Amino acid sequence: MQHIDGMLKGVRGARLYSQAWLPAAEPRALLLLVHGLGEHSGRYGNVVNAVVPRGYGVYALDHLGHGRSEGTRKYVERFTDFTEPLRTYLRLLADRHPGKAVFLVGHSMGGLIAAVHLLEHQADFRGAVLSAPAVAVDRSVSAATVAVGKVLALVAPKVGILGLDINGISRDPAVVRAALADPLNYQGKMTARLGAELLNAIQRLAREAGKIRLPLLVLQGTDDRLVDPVGAQMLYDKVSSPDKTIRIYPGLYHELFNEPEHAEVIEELLGWLEARSS
């Protein structure tokens, strides 16, 4: 397996970290991985170690304000700060691997980013996989908190408003310990502006999800404590894809690819990719 990395120019000149894992031969197809809130692209080793030996190449960015990329942590000025770099990166992939099919794979906030990106650019991809997508407002967040967050997004956009419980990512204690010890994982609160931009994106997706028609696989654990599991079913029901699949995993937490049962989840992913890669 070959690993390459570098920097990509993002919005407003920010330098974004990129990396790829490639098989020895030219890959049969590519996965463009879109990571979640507060984490980084290097946390998907279970996926990389499974798909690259099968001949797939994996490319990934650290979002603005995440991982090794520049930018204020957990902050964007607008949601397109996430989606515009995907287009730039995809052009680079097309130059490196002309004609190769690309699958968009998004987890958590990355699932929301991926889904919104598909509203305008689904023709660039062979299909998409969304793992525990953050596509619904969590019912535990009160209307008052949402209202205050909207005001703060205007008057104090970089103030922290909401945190995530890292213990909710996986039932595997080793995964939780590694996440807590990882210096590239930012454990501070989400900024008010980012919260407002995510809310706007969720609302847009709820209105426009029917535009999505490409092959789609949605994966969700029933005991997810970081995103509302109802969002996955809602999205699945609203998209117009003739080829769509949802897999609900009883008892699993948020990071399906890092749960004790991750081998089962990844086999589902591999089987789906194999059927759509030719």
Image (cartoon, rainbow, N blue to C red):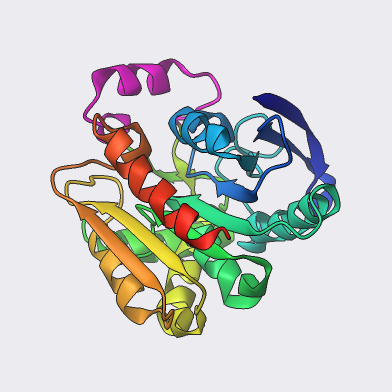
Relative to 60, say whether 92 is above or below. Answer: below
Quadrant that contains the N terminus: top right
Residue at 44% across, 67% down: 216
Q: Residue at x 32, y 58 (%)?
A: 145
Where is residue 215 shown, x and y percent of the image? Answer: 47, 70
Decide: is 193 above or below 215: above
> Which is nearer the eye, 69 or 105?
105
Q: Nearer the viewer, residue 219 or 127?
A: 127
Answer yes or no: is residue 40 visible.
no
Q: Quadrant of residue 169?
A: top left
In the image: residue 235, left or right of residue 66: left
Q: Is residue 178 magenta?
A: yes
Q: Which residue occupies the foreground of this view, 94 or 160?
A: 94
**Residue 32 image offset from top left, x and y in percent:** 61, 49
Number of marks drawn: 0
- Tell me if 220 is positioned left or right of 116 in this view: left
When the figure is inspected, residue 92 is found, relative to residue 216, above or below; the finding is above
Q: Which residues are magenta?
A: 166-187
What residue occupies the far left of the structure in this picture?
Answer: 251
Membership of 192 in magenta stretch? no
Residue 176 at what x, y percent from top left? 32, 23
Which image quarter: residue 126?
bottom right
Residue 124: x and y in percent read: 68, 68
Instruction: Point out the image quarter for the C terminus.
Output: bottom right
Residue at position x 57%, y 46% in the image = 33
| Residue 276 in sight | yes
- Residue 169 appears left or right of 32: left
Compare residues 15 and 143 and report the one nearer the observer: 15
